[in-house]
Image: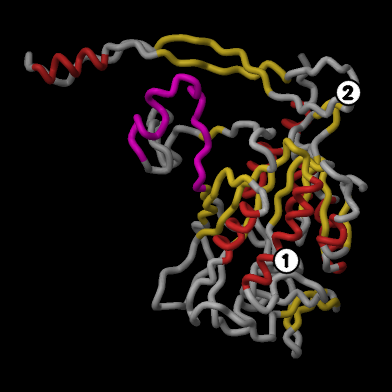
């Protein structure tokens, strides 16, 4: 198994060649069911029924589970589709913002190379026409049946979603990102989010996040351990971004940056394989007493209000001082991110930028040069380089 390489082949067969417990995390977005024909024999997503699709997909993740370390996690972006949809739904290359043209036979091309064509064969559904198939629900339940631990269901909210011409239902503006673990205990670096309202005009206008919740329930008032922020929530508002190459399904880099930071360690001991974890220096202090009550009378409500506001609440300020050290003295290496459905190369691009190793699998050989071209323009961030120099 070579690191920082894109393997060309069918995911299941390539995964079988990888050794057990060899990667630190997996994040991927498999082809959605019944949506598009990418013009490659053996592709996933055009099975005769949703159940056949789920069985084949989860069999691939059985191999992912085998090659994943016991401390590893798996993140899967998947969406639903409707029964009875017209073959070829999804729009043209031009409308999708892609730099490719449509041929007379329904295929698309760029630089005289055939790229992708929409599906043409009719699929069989086990629900009535116009009904959602429930693919994400079927998938996540089957994954749990096969031994995966489901930790989170993350909602990817797309504020600028693809417009829909339907008039008898609502426009879908979200997708699922499922977070699984192999074992009850696994590597996870806590991710924080700001407590400030993004639309606030002043730096002092705090206490609400995205307009939801008051001070108490947004995690600001009484959380003495997360003074610099709060534990990240599970609704992520991320705008889609076009990719002007020959690929129709590209998830944004912002969607997978957080999972990679949370699930793939930057430094792992070469001898004992223990990931280094961040170490913090905590400063415990108390807040200043509040201002006087807005009540001027001597009522019972006024007295209780003053007593509450005059309390001195504790707070804790955390400062990163370095990383843990197992004491082996054998040096460290970066974690490995696996994507068995590499597509346009987003996972590899973000992994490289964040200083992690990557392994990708892609069935369509025409995507490989596009991925390599994209990776050639990626630089490791300065913040990542600095993190490798933090030693205890």
Check disc 1 and report the residue beneath it: 56
Query: Which stretch did the figure color magenta?
Result: 213-235
Q: CA distance from mark 1 to mark 2?
A: 40 Å
Residue 91: give its label: none
On the image, the x and y values in percent for residue 42 come to 81, 73
On the image, the x and y values in percent for residue 371 come to 82, 58
Q: Mark 1–mark 2 contact, CB under 8 Å?
A: no
Look at the image and say whether residue 382 sits in the magenta stretch: no
Check disc 2 and report the residue beneath it: 331
Callout 2: SS: loop
The mark total stands at: 2
Q: Is residue 363 visible?
A: yes
Q: Is residue 243 visible?
A: no
Q: Quadrant of residue 68?
A: top right
Of residue 51 and residue 172, the one placed in the foreground of this image is 51
Q: Residue at x 56, y 13 (%)?
A: 282
Mark 2, Cα crowd under 10 Å, few <14 / some 14-19 / many 20+, is few
Judge from the rendering whether residue 235 lies leftward or rightward of residue 97; answer left or right. Answer: left
Look at the image and say whether residue 230 sits in the magenta stretch: yes
Q: Residue at x 45, y 32 (%)?
A: 195
Callout 1: SS: helix
Q: Is residue 65 above or below residue 60?
A: above
């Amino acid at each position: 198994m070579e690191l920082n390489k894109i393997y060309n082949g069918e995911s299941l067969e390539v995964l079988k060649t990888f050794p057990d417990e060899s990667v630190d995390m997996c994040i991927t977005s498999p082809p959605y069911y019944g949506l598009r024909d990418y013009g490659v024999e053996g592709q996933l997503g055009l099975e005769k029924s949703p159940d056949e699709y789920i069985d084949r997909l989860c069999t691939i993740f059985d191999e992912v589970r085998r090659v994943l370390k016991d401390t590893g996690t798996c993140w899967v972006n998947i969406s639903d589709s409707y029964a009875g949809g017209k073959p070829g739904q999804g729009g043209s290359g031009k409308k999708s913002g892609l730099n490719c043209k449509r041929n007379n036979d329904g295929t698309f091309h760029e630089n005289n190379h055939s790229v992708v064509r929409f599906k043409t064969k009719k699929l069989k559904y086990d629900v009535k026409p116009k009904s959602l198939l429930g693919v994400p629900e079927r998938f996540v339940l089957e994954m749990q049946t096969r031994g995966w631990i489901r930790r989170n269901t993350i909602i990817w909210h797309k504020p600028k979603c693809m417009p829909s011409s339907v008039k008898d239902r609502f426009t879908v503006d979200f997708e699922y990102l499922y977070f699984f673990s192999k074992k009850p205990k696994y590597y996870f670096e806590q991710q924080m989010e700001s407590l400030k309202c993004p639309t606030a005009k002043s730096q002092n206008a705090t206490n609400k996040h995205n307009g939801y919740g008051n001070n108490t329930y947004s995690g600001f008032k009484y959380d003495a351990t997360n003074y610099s922020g709060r534990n990240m929530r599970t609704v992520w508002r991320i705008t889609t971004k076009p990719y002007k190459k020959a690929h129709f399904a590209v998830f944004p880099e912002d969607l997978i940056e957080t999972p990679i930071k949370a699930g793939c360690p930057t430094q792992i001991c070469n001898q004992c394989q223990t990931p280094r974890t961040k170490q913090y220096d905590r400063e415990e202090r108390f807040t200043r007493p509040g201002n006087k009550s807005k009540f001027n009378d001597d009522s019972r409500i006024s007295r209780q209000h003053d007593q509450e506001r005059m309390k001195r609440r504790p707070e804790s300020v955390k400062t990163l001082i370095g990383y843990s050290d197992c004491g082996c003295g054998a040096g460290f290496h970066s974690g490995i991110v696996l994507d068995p459905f590499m597509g346009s190369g987003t996972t590899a691009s973000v992994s490289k930028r964040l200083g992690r190793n990557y392994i990708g699998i892609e069935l369509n050989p025409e995507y490989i040069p596009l991925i390599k071209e994209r990776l050639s323009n990626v630089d490791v961030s300065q913040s990542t380089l600095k993190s490798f120099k933090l030693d205890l």
